[in-house]
Image (cartoon, helix red, strand yellow):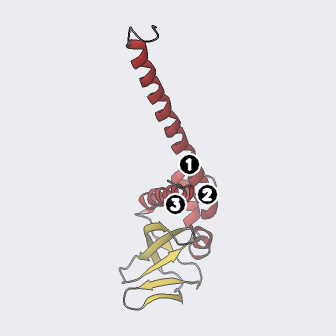
Amino acid sequence: MSKKDKNEELKTEVGKQIVRLLADEIFTVDGTPTVTVNNPNIGYRNKPLSPGAEFMLKDAYVGARGNLIFILSPADGQDYTIELDPKKIDDVFVDFGGTLGEKVGIKSEKTDAIVRKLITMERNAAEKRAEELERQKFQQTASIYNSNPLFGRF
């Protein structure tokens, strides 16, 4: 597996974790930001959102440029979604970063900083799991040789 694939896999896993944590939260639009809207009938368009509109986090994926993208849908069930990256989501939903920070125990108001920290934590945990697996394989191999009474005899 290439380094790029591992990075995308880590980001995808972090995105899934964030979606699980924030699935029941409702976020309110602050101001009238222009965002990427995906309407099934029209496709992708940049459109301004109405102030006070409410959205729920539905999914996350890694985009073509390798960035994590959050997909949110209107809380009132309208048939479209918006897509935002962690750098822009705080401009649209001022409470997103704070809510995410509370849920994961990271003291930050910026979603981008929290996501980077979560990716680093996930990468460190994956490396630790790989090291532990390697250590277990070594111990298993060593125990096989140690249990053989003929091992080392010439």
Residue at image position (46%, 67%) is: 60
Foreground tag (2 vs 3): 3
Query: Which residue is the extreme one toward the front?
Result: 154
Q: Residues within 10 Å of mark 3 (few under 14, many from 20)?
A: some
Secondary structure under the numbered disc 2 in the rendered image:
helix
Query: Between 55 and 13, which is closer to the camera in this rendering?
Result: 13
Upstream in sequence: badge 2 or badge 1: 2
Query: Between 49 and 121, which is closer to the camera in this rendering?
Result: 121
Residue 28 in the image: above or below residue 121: below
Secondary structure under the numbered disc 1 in the rendered image:
helix
* Residue receiving disc 3: 8
Name the kind of residue labelled 1 in the image: Arg
The image shows residue 106 at horizontal and vertical percentages of 60, 51
The image shows residue 145 at horizontal and vertical percentages of 42, 17
Query: Which residue is the extreme one toward the bottom?
Result: 42
Secondary structure under the numbered disc 3 in the rendered image:
helix
Name the kind of residue labelled 3 in the image: Glu
The image shows residue 87 at horizontal and vertical percentages of 62, 69
Disc marking residue 123: 1
Upstream in sequence: badge 2 or badge 3: 3
Upstream in sequence: badge 3 or badge 1: 3
Query: Between 114 and 41, which is closer to the camera in this rendering?
Result: 41
In terms of image quadrants, where is residue 74?
A: bottom left
Disc marking residue 116: 2
Cβ–Cβ under 8 Å for marks 3 and 1: no
The image shows residue 138 at horizontal and vertical percentages of 48, 26
Alpha carbon of mark 2 to alpha carbon of mark 1: how far?
10 Å
Name the kind of residue labelled 2 in the image: Arg
Alpha carbon of mark 3 to alpha carbon of mark 1: how far?
11 Å
Alpha carbon of mark 2 to alpha carbon of mark 3: how far?
13 Å
In terms of image quadrants, where is residue 58?
A: bottom left
